[in-house]
Amino acid sequence: MRLSTRLLLPLLTTVALVMGLYTAWSIKQREATLAIEAQRETEALATALGLALEYAFRDRKLADVQDIIDRVSLQPKVYGVLVYGPKGDILFVSDPLRATGLTPPRDLGEVFRIGRTIGFERHLAGQHVYSVLRPIRNPKGKIVGAFEVAQPLSFLEAERAATRNRFLLNTVTLLAAITAVILVLVRRLIGAPLRGLVGAVRALGRGELGYRIDEGRGGGELRELAREFNRMAEGLEGARAELVREAEERIALERRLRETEKLAAVGNLAASLAHEIAAPLNVVSGRAELLLKREAAPEVRERNLRIIVEQIGRITTIIRNLLDFSRRREPRIRPVDLGSVLEGVTELLEGELARAGVQIARIGPERAWIRGDAHLLHQVFLNLLLNALQAMAERDGERRITIRLTSEAGADGAPAWVTAEVEDTGPGIPPHALPRVFEPFFTTKAGGQGTGLGLAVALSIVEEHGGALEADNAFGPDGRVTGAVFRVRLPAASAPEYAHA
């Protein structure tokens, strides 16, 4: 129910009730006043008529009595006149009452006995009237008769109806005027400021903390409410700025801690790294000494040189992965089409995939916009696809890598997250290795085939993008492991945002 309706209903009900009570009281007071006036008029008329009738009775000109009462009954406020004899019988009746059966009033005997004028209400010939009963005296003061002057009270009913209609019209007019005034005042003084406040609350809900209300509209309370709302919005805006600043500081601190952890991991695993590098260096040294001591056959020299190149490449790979893990640059975040990144990675590995007999299957949309660094994400998916390729190297049967792209909508219906799954048909990840698969220098590959830094680097890159990287096994309908699956969850972006970047 609208505020104007909630204000009008009790107000109009109260006004209507008060006007109704006042109308009833006014009608009652008006009736009492008119009744008193009618009584006075009737008594005054009876007094004047009494003198005329007394003269007629004294001069015994009774024939003039009928003419007198007929002329008196012609007045609009006189219903009729009756003249009674000394025995209470009806002697004369005015013209309007001649054809009706009339009965003397009950108080007639009291008038003859006491000799005073009496006023009363009664029904005369089917009409409600006010009658004045007055004695007729002779010159000696003896009562020789009586007469009754009746005034109709129907005018009271007409006056009551007129008063009721007048007050009803006044009440309707007053209610209409009050309704119009209240609607205008509510719309201007309450409705408009409240609509502004509702719009401000909605803007605040959308995160527009810089929205402010005009404090000059509305009454004092609404102005105070607008002032408090603006003060609250300023506080929320300041709190958000403080939270953003603290979040940025926390992110910077987390990055520094992450770099510290990386350096600590590098220090803790220096011995392992030295062992990894020492083994190929010993091989290189031994092969070089053999080449220096004696003149070997060409095929032996070629074999030794090939082994030296392979071991040097292994050392180079170890050092490069270590540098990527310990000194990687900060990501340059912007809208990126993840589908294009995946296409670039698969094109780069096209030769290796063909030689290994591995098929690539894409499921989901061709384009998926995320916020990230295309170069670093290329490195992430390159590591994941190389791991899948190496996992299926010694496996018989179908070799396939499936890449799935799905999006997850936010509260407003727009994409909020994009998930990319890389699933292979290899042997899967051993259960004991799942909790440690992202640890630096931890690997499940055969000796000399991996450094254990690829997944650690990929996890670090994904987390710096505000996303998550998970590892799990894929299972078939029979519950058997059908391969490993890695899920990369990244914040979504929109194509228009990329177009304006």
Image: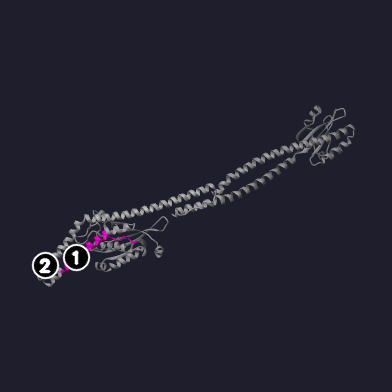
Q: Residue at x 20, y 58 (%)?
A: 273
- Residue 142 colored magenta? no
Q: Is residue 29 left or right of residue 230?
A: right
Hey, which quadrant is residue 272 in on the image?
A: bottom left
Give the farthest residue toward the bottom. 298
Q: Residues within 10 Å of mark 1 (few under 14, many from 20)?
A: some
Give the residues in magenta: 305-332
Q: Amino acid at mark 2?
A: Leu
Q: Which mark is residue 290?
A: 2
Q: Within the image, what quadrant is residue 459 found in?
A: bottom left
Q: Secondary structure at mark 1?
A: helix
Q: Quadrant of the C terminus?
A: bottom left
Q: Position of residue 299 (x, y in %)?
A: 13, 71
Q: Is residue 310 magenta?
A: yes
Frontmost residue, 316 versus 377: 316
Query: Which residue is identified by label 1?
Result: 312
**x, y percentage for residue 143?**
84, 28
Q: Could you tell which of marks 2 and 1 lies nearer the N-terminus?
A: 2
Q: Main secondary structure of the magenta part?
A: helix
In the image, what residue occupies the spot 62% across and 43% down? 15
**CA distance separating discs 2 and 1:** 17 Å
Instruction: Report the side of 24 relative to 210 (left or right).
Output: right
Residue drawn at x 86%, y 37% as measured from the top left:
66
The amino acid sitting under disc 1 is Ile
